[in-house]
Image: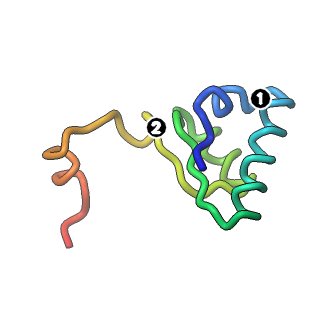
Amino acid sequence: MKIDKSFVDGLDDVKDRELVKTIIAISKSMELGVIAEGIETKHQVETLYNMGCELFQGYYFSKPLSAAKIRSWLPKT
């Protein structure tokens, strides 16, 4: 299940924060993975992680990359 960027942006709003907590709880109860999109700050990562979200995507980690750049960005195995 994906947490939309609009909710991530609204984490400082009590209603949005409660909705995000509910999305995470529903995902866990249904044994689904949950990912938060649009992460731009460390504060967002920490807040969502403390709520139980463990997967994130957004500019905080990297801007979109081409397939070739992704290969060079990933660790060599």
Q: Which quadrant would residue 20 be assigned to in this image? A: top right
Viewer-side residue, 35 vs 62: 35
Where is residue 8 drawn, in percent x and y?
64, 33
Q: Is residue 15 left or right of residue 48?
A: right
Amino acid type of disc 2? Gly
Disc ID at residue 58 = 2
Amino acid type of disc 1? Asp
Toward the bottom, the furthest residue is 77
Where is residue 43 drawn, in percent x and y?
64, 39
**Of callouts 2 and 1, which one flags the residue occurring earlier in the amino acid sequence?**
1
Which secondary structure lies at badge 1?
A: loop
- Residue visible at 77% across and 29% down? 12
- The residue that disc 1 covers is 12
Which secondary structure lies at badge 2?
A: loop
- Residue visible at 34% across and 34% down? 63
Whether 38 is drawn above or below 46: the answer is above
Q: Which quadrant would residue 16 be assigned to in this image? A: top right
Whether 77 is drawn above or below 68: the answer is below
* Alpha carbon distance from label 2 to label 1: 18 Å
- Residue visible at 60% across and 50% down? 1
Counting other residues with Cα less than 10 Å from the Cα at mark 1, is it few (<14), some (14-19), or many (20 or more)?
few
Viewer-side residue, 16 vs 45: 16
Where is residue 42 drawn, in percent x and y?
58, 41
Q: Which quadrant would residue 54 be assigned to in this image? A: bottom right
Q: Is residue 7 left or right of residue 18?
A: left
Counting other residues with Cα less than 10 Å from the Cα at mark 2, is it few (<14), some (14-19), or many (20 or more)?
some
Q: Is residue 57 left or right of residue 50?
A: left
Where is residue 13 drawn, in percent x and y?
81, 26
- Residue visible at 62% across and 62% down? 32
